[in-house]
Image (tube, rainbow, N blue to C red):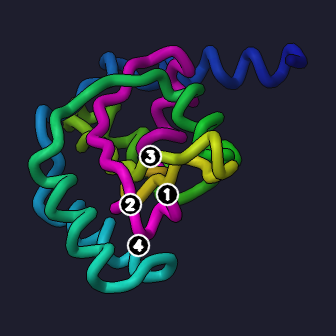
Amino acid sequence: MGAGKKDRKKRLRLEASRPEHWKDAPDGHDFPAAASYLGLIADGRTIEALVLALRSAPTLHAKAKDLLRASRLPLLGTDNAHVVADLDKVRGGEPLSPVLLVRGALRHDRPLTVADGYHRICASYHLDENADIPYRIVDLPPVEAGE
């Protein structure tokens, strides 16, 4: 990593002024947001089952870098408006909402699906790639999973 990139990451951490913190449970609007995204890649019955399961799933923790790797999503930059908004929340002491995930499948080469919270994962990564991010995860129903 070049010196400029290291300096920028260090500056981001210093600018945050407060440590990142998270809510214990997702916000109510996160579930419809997850359903909206999942509606692009799954049928209605599958979406209903996934969102219902996400509402009651336990909250676990994983590192930002691992969530990005498992999802195969690129890291969004600090020039992305939604990432900036989440970084501003951290600076203001506002807790971030846990992310909502659908488990991938190594056997089927299916990556982790970030149903809601991609920008929060990226914001967290920019602050500390080793930060533990709270998440809820569910499996695809067996018929949808092709198993």
- Residues 146 and 131: in front is 146
Q: CA distance from mark 2 to mark 3?
A: 12 Å
SS for dot 4: helix
Q: Amino acid at mark 3?
A: Arg
Q: Residues within 10 Å of mark 3 (few under 14, many from 20)?
A: some
Write the start and end of the magenta stretch as one range.
119-147
Q: Amino acid at mark 1?
A: Glu
Q: Amino acid at mark 4?
A: Leu
Q: Which residue is mark 1?
A: 147
- Quadrant that contains the N terminus: top right
**67, above or below 139, in the image:** above
Q: Which residue is mark 3?
A: 103
**7, above or below 102, in the image:** above
In contact (CB < 8 Å): disc 4 and disc 2: no
- In terms of sequence position, does the residue under pointer 3 or pointer 4 come before the other? 4
- In terms of sequence position, does the residue under pointer 1 or pointer 2 come before the other? 2
Q: Position of residue 13 (x, y in %)?
A: 51, 18
The mark lying in front, picked from 1 and 4, is 1
Q: CA distance from mark 4 to mark 2?
A: 16 Å
Q: Amino acid at mark 2?
A: Pro
The single residue placed furthest to the right in the displayed view is 2
**92, above or below 74, in the image:** above
- In terms of sequence position, does the residue under pointer 4 or pointer 2 come before the other? 4
